[in-house]
Amino acid sequence: MSDCLFCKIAAGEIPSDKVYEDELCYAFNDIAPQAPSHFLVIPKTHIDSVSEINGSNSTLVAHIFEVIAKITAEKGIKSYRVVSNIGEQAGQSVPHLHFHVLSGRDMTWPPG
Ligand code: 5GP
Ligand code: ZN
């Protein structure tokens, strides 16, 4: 999607602090971290949110979760939270599928 912030970040058109990249996905540190470690993992192709996951793109989403396991293992992160906000009421501010990976502090439950 031409006007999408995260499509532009994935394409390298807007700079970001890269954590990981492969042919399918891109991971980068959040600009406003909510924990000592807070990075986002996004597909390189545009998907609006978890609501748009279906049989034609779920392999890509499974790959993203493999990548989350790989990045956290390599960083020695043993406990972390994966979050994806869907829609306005849940707090989604960028309409391109992304998984927040947060760690390095005690987490509360339920989330706010
Ligand atoms: P959401 O609010 O949609 O769940 O998450 C979007 C996240 O993207 C937020 O945590 C926000 O800080 C982050 N973000 C927004 N714009 C940028 C940006 O230009 N660069 C980076 N690295 N993160 C961003
Ligand atoms: Zn996009």
Image (cartoon, rainbow, N blue to C red):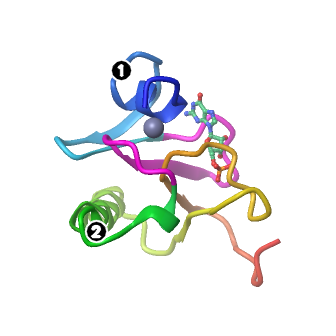
Q: Is residue 9 above or below residue 112?
A: above
Left or right: residue 41 versus residue 58 is: right
Q: Amino acid at mark 2?
A: Ser
Quick one: which residue is furthest to the bottom in this view? 109
Across and down, in percent, residue 50 comes to 49, 65
Q: Which residues are magenta?
A: 29-48
Q: Which quadrant holds residue 100?
A: bottom right
Cβ(mark 1) to ligand 1 < 8 Å? no
Across and down, in percent, residue 48 comes to 50, 51
The residue mark sitting in front, 2 or 1, is 2
What residue does disc 2 label? 58
From the image, which quarter does the N terminus lie in? top left
Q: Amino acid at mark 1?
A: Gly
From the image, which quarter does the C terminus lie in? bottom right
Across and down, in percent, residue 98 comes to 49, 53
- Tell me which residue sits at (34%, 70%) in the image: 54
Ligand 1, what quadrant? top right
* Marked residue nearer the N-terminal end (2 or 1): 1
Across and down, in percent, residue 99 comes to 49, 58
- Tally of marks: 2
Q: What is the CA distance from the residue labelled 2 to the residue labelled 1?
A: 24 Å
In this view of the protein, which residue sits in the foreground, 8 or 40? 8
In this view of the protein, which residue sits in the foreground, 99 or 31? 99
Say which element carries label 2: helix
Say which element carries label 1: loop
**Residue 38 magenta:** yes
Cβ(mark 2) to ligand 2 < 8 Å? no
What residue does disc 1 label? 12
